Image: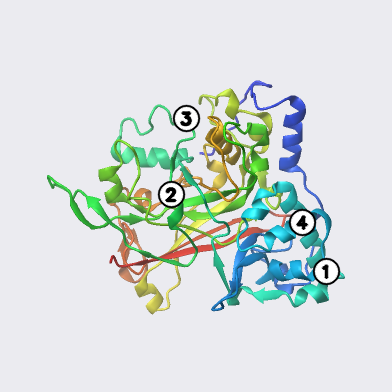
Amino acid sequence: MRRVPRAVPAGRGASGAPADRLANLARMTSVDETHDPALRSWVQSANASGCDFPIQNLPFAAFRRAGSHEPFRGAVAIGDEVLDLGALHGAGVFDGAAGRALAAAAQPTLNALMGEGRGAAAALRRALSGALRTGSALESRLRTLLVPQRAAEYRVAAEVGDYTDFYASIHHATSVGRLFRPDNPLLPNYKWVPIAYHGRASSIRVSGFELQRPVGQLLPPGAAQPVLGPTRRLDYELEVGVFIGRGNALGEPVPLAQAEEHVFGLCLLNDWSARDIQSWEYQPLGPFLAKNFATTVSPWVVTLEALIPYRTAWTRPAGEPPPLAYLDDEPVRRAGGFDLRLEVWLDTAKMRARGIAAQRLSHSNFRDSWWTVSQMVAHHTVNGCNLRPGDLFGSGTQSGPAPDEAGSLLELSGGGKRPIALGEGESRTFLEDGDRVSFRAWCEREGLARIGFGELTGTVRPAA
């Protein structure tokens, strides 16, 4: 069942004065002309039904022409094209706040743009919306700056200095907990603390990465001592990535009401996991080699501005404990969530060889997350921890309440006990060499423009 809203006494939150809270709610929910579903672009592919990248989206990435030795630079997606922001900066068509933001976006990574804050990115998005819409006087100048997406290659959008992976889906936590603690699946702190661990930033890669099956210590069933070997239980985790924008000084917490001013945008994230290595090593200090060998992200980062029409209430089931005051705020309750649909697809080497399409394994929605993006930021900094532009959060595996909404094979296969049937007589409990995992995500509602995230893919190669 979906959650029902929980009544919380007015003024319970302690994240700012009433005026601050009203301003925060306005930032979350105020649409403008860039969200108009009637807007059309002179880039005709952006107007196609089902397009991930209409003019109402305009997500950012770092790109260059495929096979070239050009420097990477910023880009926005429009239809099936890439608009080269480095070349656009050189053309000198924008000034003011948009021009300054464009100069930052022309760099090899988006860290500088992220560090300028949400206002800068929003100003650039508005200027780009005007330049790319039908009837723009800039059409002839910008048309020469387009590169087909099929002819582009990408890097991770930012130089990631620090990476934190949360555990924000109660459905995932409960499902996995039942596999190990059937009578008490959730640990006592789960409903109170936005649980997270610090991951390995150096192994973050962009979509298309070919993942080498990791090796580590594992304890075979019935064995008395561990062995070193390739994981036999390789898994994916369907997550939403959060890129931090403006940072905060060491020792200065970010109040909940200001948290989203420190968020640049969202992407897709796959936290690859070796379950057998994880089960042997995770006590007492949590994940290590089971998680640090690879994390992949989608190239496109969708700004919070583009997602405004899809804000949704953040709720808890009746009878659940309310969050502590620093994590509770009326604007977050009213509009802290995102109605973001998520899917996992799989195709095997055999399926590709025979021309069989990928098979959808599961679907879920980010609105079911136990904690919001704002709460993750506020909790991460409440002790004074400093965030920096380009830091990355993972939301944790996003599973829903239904069995087909599980965001990992660990859940879908019941810990490896229920093989998942695929085409041509194949089945999977965990990933095998040659398997390709694809994540997709989008927001869609009648009367609104579809806001897509593109695709995140990764293919498993044999262990060294």
The residues tagged by marks 2 and 4 sit, at their Cα atoms, a distance apart of 43 Å
Amino acid type for the residue under numbered disc 4: Arg
Mark 2 or mark 4, earlier in chain: 4
**Residue appearing at x 30%, y 53% in the figure:** 418
Q: Are marks 2 and 4 in contact (CB under 8 Å)?
A: no
Q: Nearer the viewer, mark 4 or mark 3?
A: 4
Secondary structure of the residue carrying tag 2 is loop
Percent coordinates x, y for residue 153 in the rendering:
56, 71
Mark 4 or mark 3, earlier in chain: 4
Q: Are marks 2 and 1 in contact (CB under 8 Å)?
A: no
The residue to which callout 1 is attached is: 134
Q: Nearer the viewer, mark 2 or mark 3?
A: 3
**Residue appearing at x 13%, y 47% in the figure:** 223
Secondary structure of the residue carrying tag 1 is loop
How dense is the environment of label 2, judged by Cα within 10 Å: few (below 14), some, or many (20 and up)? many
The residues tagged by marks 1 and 4 sit, at their Cα atoms, a distance apart of 25 Å
How dense is the environment of label 1, judged by Cα within 10 Å: few (below 14), some, or many (20 and up)? some
**Residue appearing at x 67%, y 29% in the figure:** 330
The residue to which callout 2 is attached is: 406
Secondary structure of the residue carrying tag 4 is helix
The residue to which callout 4 is attached is: 100
* 212 to 276, vertically: above or below: below
Q: Which mark is residue 420?
A: none
Percent coordinates x, y for residue 306 in the rendering:
70, 53
Amino acid type for the residue under numbered disc 2: Ala
* 450 to 383, vertically: above or below: below
The residue to which callout 3 is attached is: 191
